[in-house]
Amino acid sequence: MPIYAYKCGACGHAKDVLQKISDAPLTQCPACGAEAFAKQLTAAGFQLKGSGWYVTDFRGGNAAASSPTAAPAPEAAPAAAPAACAACPAAAASKD
């Protein structure tokens, strides 16, 4: 059963009520008795379960593989001289 949030427009009293979806909404405030008790619009609270979600993807497992303090991989040695491209002006002048 869902939990609905209610608030009185007259006195400001707020209350969460466990109700069936088919139940009629409450209208009378339990604090002041006014007919100004209205259902509030609230965000649904839910939790994503199972694999494929952020909570389970990065928790536990192999600590060495996901450790941010791991040493970076050694960089590859740079190439001796990059090949000139055909669109570069210097390469076009040397071909003539």
Image (cartoon, rainbow, N blue to C red):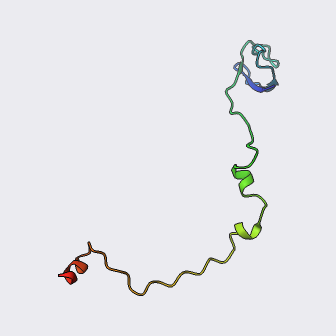
Above or below residue 73? Residue 35 is above
Q: Which residue is at a point 73% across and 43% down the rendered structure image? A: 48
Query: Dividing the picture into quarters, in which one does residue 21 lie?
Result: top right
Quadrant that contains the C terminus: bottom left
Q: How far across and how far down the image is residue 16, in percent?
A: 79, 27
Task: Tell which residue pokes out farthest to the front in this image.
Answer: 95
The answer to whether 85 appears left or right of 31 in the picture is left
Q: Taking 78 as reference, is 35 left or right?
A: right
Q: Is residue 60 depicted above or below 89 in this figure?
A: above
Would you identify the image quadrant in which residue 82 lies? bottom left
Q: Position of residue 88 (x, y in %)?
A: 26, 75
Query: What residue is at 80 percent from the left and 17 percent from the top?
Result: 32
Position of residue 24 measured from the top left corner of the image (x, y, whole percent): 76, 13
Viewport quadrant of the N terminus: top right
Residue 92 occupies which quadrant of the picture? bottom left
Q: Nearer the viewer, residue 41 or 68?
A: 68
Q: Which residue is at a point 44% across and 84% down the rendered structure image? A: 79
Query: What is the x, y in percent for residue 25?
Result: 75, 15
